[in-house]
Amino acid sequence: MPWGKVDGRMPLVPSIIQGSENDPESDSGPHLMKAIPRVNPRLPVVTESDPSAGPRTLRIMSRPSAWIQIWVRTIVIGWVSLSQLKAEESVFYSEASRICGFDPVRVVDVASILAIGKIYEGLYQVAYQDRPYRVEPCLAAALPQVSADGLILTIPLRPGIRFQDDPCFKELGGRGREMTAEDFVYAFKRLADPANRSPGFGFFRGRLKGLDEFRARMEADPAGGYGSSISGITAPDRQTLRLELTRPWPQALWVLSMHFTYVVPPEAVAYYGDNIIYHPVGTGPFRLAAWRPNYRMEFVRNPEWQREGRFEPHPDDVRQAQPLLDRVVQYVIGDPSTQWMLFLKGRLDVSGIARDQWDAVVTPEGELQPEFAERGWRLYRAPASDISYIGMNYDDPVLGTNRYLRQALSAAFDRDLWGKFFGARILPAAGPLPPDIEGYRPGRTGPPDLDRARELLALAGYPGGRDPATGRRLQLSLDLGSTDPEVREAVELLVDFMARVGISIQPSYYNWPVFLARIERGDSQMFWLSWLADYPDPENFLQLFYGPNASPGVNRSNFRDPAYDRDYEAMMVLPPGLERQPVIARMMDRLQEESPWLFLHHRVNATVVQPWVTNWRPHDFPYGLFKYYGVDPAVRRRRAP
């Protein structure tokens, strides 16, 4: 869903994923750039005096004193934060990435979705503890009642759920009102509104009766469209939502657990307008207390949950009011070494393990080194449901029409050296599907086939890697959305791989929003992204190549192939099982042949957790699950360095 997820699913090591998104596709959010003022990319990570962050800090410089500055900053930030804690206040400190805002229909990067999930809620969520993953009710009172033909879903809603207090509720004097089924009808209308350019609409296109027609009406009459109804999305009463499908949809519940249809009150959109991205008003466990873009976010317990006496299903079957935390404080930390030292000092509660620290922290057997185990740290390792890739823009006149050139890039990729660089933190990729997803094919290791790469370059019209028209080496541009040091090192490797066959790769580094906007506009020739699963079904990955999902949808490469599209449309209506497996295999073969991506790797998540953190479990879909996390203040005081 982007990146620096530190809450459950996380990479936590920005270096392994250059950037991840999750639009239905990591990220869009680029469309969001039309609604969000540009964030100044030159802002330092920690920029100003703040009671929980310490005094203004210096930019890290490339001289020996830089490490002293980092260490001083670590002590100052951590000491001030912990010294101001109330005796029994439960506060969770973690790292986060820059976010694009707080509007559920507009964002798709993981960092933004994780932030939104603390404030907004949807009909369903992915259960926290159960494996294999399953969907469970959130604001719905139960799973849908399904008609005999499978086309009508009747969803009961939980009574008595209220939005947080906010000035937008003028008629109630700022008191949050009760959520109703009409609020979900409105959420679907916002999703379909072309003005919002939601990357999530692709999930629902052609799926719900009347939704596409509503979108067409909005295009024709933007001012009056919201007053019209959608035949397949109705509210028979205040506590019932009725959805009518156009055809069977095996993934419907998974999609309804995503953030695009999180409930947003119309009053908030009317009151804040485009600034709704800065003023979230939800039903969730937390409220936004402070947000300083590129620096810090703070969330506080939503008092409405205490007034309601909400008890959510707890993974340990403990009847305990939630959320368990009083506050969540998250910092944008651009440097992995700084993040790691903050964790060492007990100023962050969870952390990934950067490449430079791996051998010092983890034994060859994959366990914590004894000195860290004695501190009470816990280590979690598991393959992630993701894919990291170099996307190639099919609208680009050089790459898009030249299959041999794309194949040559794949043949020149040195999987052996790539694997040695990242070590035990990745698995090689042979396609978009990660481990534990139906249709997965294990990736191979081994040296590149340089002879084959040169043959393909000649077939592509670039013998020896040179452009016959100019006599110069072929130059290709690669866009990056991160300046993380490990990303830069990995890119240097990639540049070297391609130089062996005469291709010159020119990397360009952008801040995350600008990077995504370039991809959306089609300005990027090649780009490094990662896709993290929205739900554990191959359709969620294979949609990334479906022609109608071209950018600003999730098909970032703008790949178009009629044979692939036909197979994808056939697969969409098939439930998991033997019938759809050969369809998936044909699609995978087609992607290998056409090479719209250079498949890099799948991450292996490695997360260390402090001893005072309770109820924390790794999760591939952790959105909205912060309500389960806990911190024991007494243990923190006793064991923090």
Image (cartoon, helix red, strand yellow):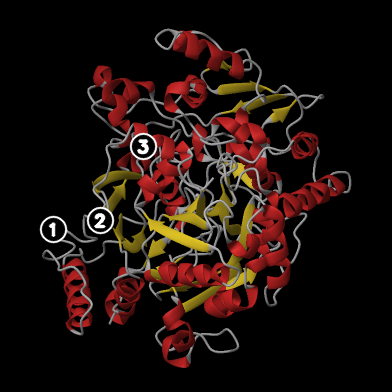
Residue 140 drawn at (x, y percent): 56, 34
Q: Mark 3–mark 2 contact, CB under 8 Å?
A: no
* Label 2 neighbour load within 10 Å: few <14, some 14-19, many 20+: many
Residue that sits furthest to the bottom in the current view: 370
Q: Residue at x 19, y 69 (%)?
A: 77
Question: What is the total number of numbered labels drawn onto the structure image?
Answer: 3
Instruction: Name which of mark 3 and mark 1 comes first in the sequence.
Output: 3
Q: Mark 2–mark 1 contact, CB under 8 Å?
A: yes
In the structure shown, which secondary structural element does the residue marked by tag 1 occupy?
loop
In the drawing, does residue 526 fall left or right of residue 409? left
Instruction: Name which of mark 2 and mark 1 comes first in the sequence.
Output: 1
Q: Which mark is residue 295?
A: 2
In the drawing, does residue 551 fall left or right of residue 267? right
In this rendering, the label closer to the viewer, 3 or 2? 3
* Label 3 neighbour load within 10 Å: few <14, some 14-19, many 20+: many
Q: Residue at x 55, y 85 (%)?
A: 367
Residue 7 appears anywhere in the view: no
Determine whether 190 is above or below 87 in the image.
above
Q: Which mark is residue 48?
A: 1
Q: Quadrant of residue 426?
A: bottom right
Q: Residue at x 41, y 29 (%)?
A: 264
In the structure shown, which secondary structural element does the residue marked by tag 3 occupy?
helix
For the C terminus, the image quarter is bottom left
Query: Which residue position is annotated with label 3?
Result: 33
Q: Residue at x 30, y 59 (%)?
A: 332
Residue 65 drawn at (x, y percent): 17, 83
Determine whether 51 is above or below 151 in the image.
below
The amino acid type, in three-letter code, at marker 2 is Tyr
Q: Quadrant of residue 620?
A: bottom right
Residue 368 drawn at (x, y percent): 50, 85
In the structure shown, which secondary structural element does the residue marked by tag 2 occupy?
loop
Determine whether 172 is above or below 137 in the image.
above
